[in-house]
């Protein structure tokens, strides 16, 4: 039974949330109703914030910042909870967007959807979903600079531009053609 797992607990706000020590999570959060879509500069600001604490507070496997939502695939490091990580990311990006773009009011919905990734197959499925999300929304898309996946074999970090579809089932996991230009850390990101 899941409740017998070390570090397992569950709680509920509007959505149920399950936590397990050492788990990887697939997370989605959305813009608050009535907020206009994120433009390219705003998406880039969210990317910088998400990438900033990779390897320090969490291990990031992949993400995509869409026009109205964000998907992350990550594993919190010891001493950091998913709740704390998400609060930090959402509050920092909200303040940044308000200050730099003049957005007012709530930027993100209060609650995020999160799911414990339970198997390697599910992990690969979620990573493929992240990479293909832009193409699903905009089928003509061949370049989308706000998607990123870690190379699972070497843990090398690539950032950049989606050019090719994902290949599932390779030993190193899904792959996509990305440019190798690393993103700069976000200045002033706070936790």
Image (cartoon, rainbow, N blue to C red):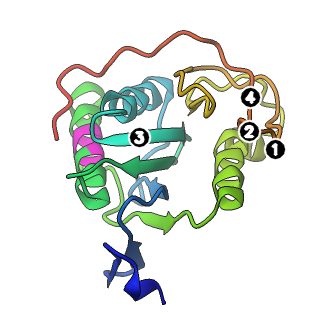
Q: Quadrant of the C terminus?
A: top left
Q: Is residue 143 left or right of residue 154?
A: right
Can the viewer see residue 104?
A: no
Q: Rounded to the nearest whole Å, what is the CA distance between mark 1 and mark 3?
A: 21 Å
Instruction: Determine contact: label 3, label 4, CB under 8 Å.
Output: no
Against 148, residue 21 (above or below) is below
Instruction: Determine contact: label 4, label 2, CB under 8 Å.
Output: yes
Q: Rounded to the nearest whole Å, what is the CA distance between mark 3 and mark 4?
A: 19 Å
x%, y% of residue 37? 49, 42
Residue 122, image quadrant: bottom right
- Give the mark toward the camera: 3 or 4: 3
x%, y% of residue 72? 49, 47
Against 101, residue 10 (above or below) is below
Against 29, residue 169 (above or below) is above
Q: Under tag 4, what secondary structure?
A: loop
Task: Tell me what residue is drawn at x 50 percent, y 67 percent.
Answer: 115
Q: Under tag 3, what secondary structure?
A: strand
Residue projecting furthest to the top:
181
Q: Under tag 1, what secondary structure?
A: loop
> Counting residues from the N terminus, which is met first, the one under dot 3 or under dot 2?
3
Task: Tell me what residue is drawn at x 44 percent, y 56 percent.
Answer: 29
Residue 176 has which mark?
A: 4
> Counting residues from the N terminus, which is met first, the one under dot 3 or under dot 4?
3
Q: Rounded to the nearest whole Å, what is the CA distance between mark 4 and mark 1?
A: 10 Å
In the picture of the structure, the residue carrying the numbered disc 2 is 174
In the picture of the structure, the residue carrying the numbered disc 3 is 59
């Amino acid at each position: 039974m899941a409740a017998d797992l070390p570090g397992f607990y569950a709680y509920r706000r509007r959505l149920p949330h399950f936590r397990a020590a050492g788990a990887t999570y697939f997370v989605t959060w959305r813009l608050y109703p009535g907020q206009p879509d994120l433009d390219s500069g705003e998406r880039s600001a969210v990317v910088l914030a998400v990438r900033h604490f990779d390897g320090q507070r969490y291990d990031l496997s992949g993400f995509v910042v869409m026009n109205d939502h964000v998907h992350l695939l990550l594993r919190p490091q010891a001493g950091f909870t998913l709740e704390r990580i998400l609060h930090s990311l959402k509050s920092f990006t909200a303040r940044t967007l308000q200050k730099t773009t003049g957005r007012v009011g709530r930027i993100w919905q209060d609650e995020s959807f999160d799911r414990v990734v339970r198997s390697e197959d599910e992990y690969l499925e979620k990573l493929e979903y992240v990479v293909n999300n832009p193409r699903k929304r905009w089928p003509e898309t061949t370049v989308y600079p706000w998607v990123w996946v870690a190379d699972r074999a070497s843990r090398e970090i690539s950032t950049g531009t989606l050019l090719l579809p994902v290949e599932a089932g390779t030993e190193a996991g899904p792959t996509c053609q990305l440019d190798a230009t690393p993103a700069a850390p976000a200045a002033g990101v706070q936790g």
